[in-house]
Image (tube, rainbow, N blue to C red):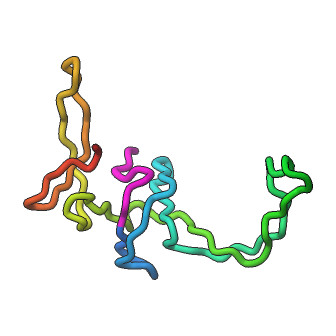
Amino acid sequence: MTLKIKQGDTVQMLSGKDRGKQGRVLEARPRDNKVIVENLNLMKRHQKPRPMRDASRMGGTQMAPGGIIDRPSAVSASNVMLVCPTCKLPTRVGYRFKEAKGGERIKVRVCKREGCGQEIDR
């Protein structure tokens, strides 16, 4: 299944405790139809202090802090909506084919909001 939201996109939450908030997509999982959004849908994780990997270059080993850590968890892609970088409003995503060098056609995501219609992928 294809996902219309990609890593690095700005999205707005449509439901849940963070409804109306915007954030950047850290990770997109098309197979599970889920995305992880920065600082949204936070879950508490109890973590033990552990030595960090590849940190033993500067003398002693560094420790990752322990305690209760807030970590963003996956949210269904149907609960987020892409924010158009041009009109700065949440929008549905459409596709358009664009001619590139050499006569090849490239599929580009576009804003479906009336009066905008700008390309999302630059």
As drawn, the residue found furthest toward the front would be 58
Which residue does the image show at 51% across and 61% down from the upper left? 36
Magenta part mainly helix, strand or loop?
A: loop
**Looking at the image, is 40 positioned above or below residue 58?**
below
Query: Residue 70 at x, y = what percent?
Result: 63, 74
Q: Start and end of the magenta stretch?
A: 1-11
**In the image, is residue 14 part of the stretch drawn in magenta?**
no
Image quarter (top left, top right, bottom left or bottom right) of the N terminus: top left
Image quarter (top left, top right, bottom left or bottom right) of the C terminus: top left
Which residue does the image show at 35% across and 73% down from the upper left? 14
Q: Left of 21 or right of it: where is 68?
A: right
Which residue does the image show at 46% across and 48% down from the upper left? 30
Image label count: 0
**Looking at the image, is 19 positioned above or below residue 97?**
below
Q: Left of 85 or right of it: where is 99?
A: left
As drawn, the residue found furthest toward the right would be 60
Q: Left of 30 or right of it: where is 11?
A: left
As drawn, the residue found furthest toward the top would be 102
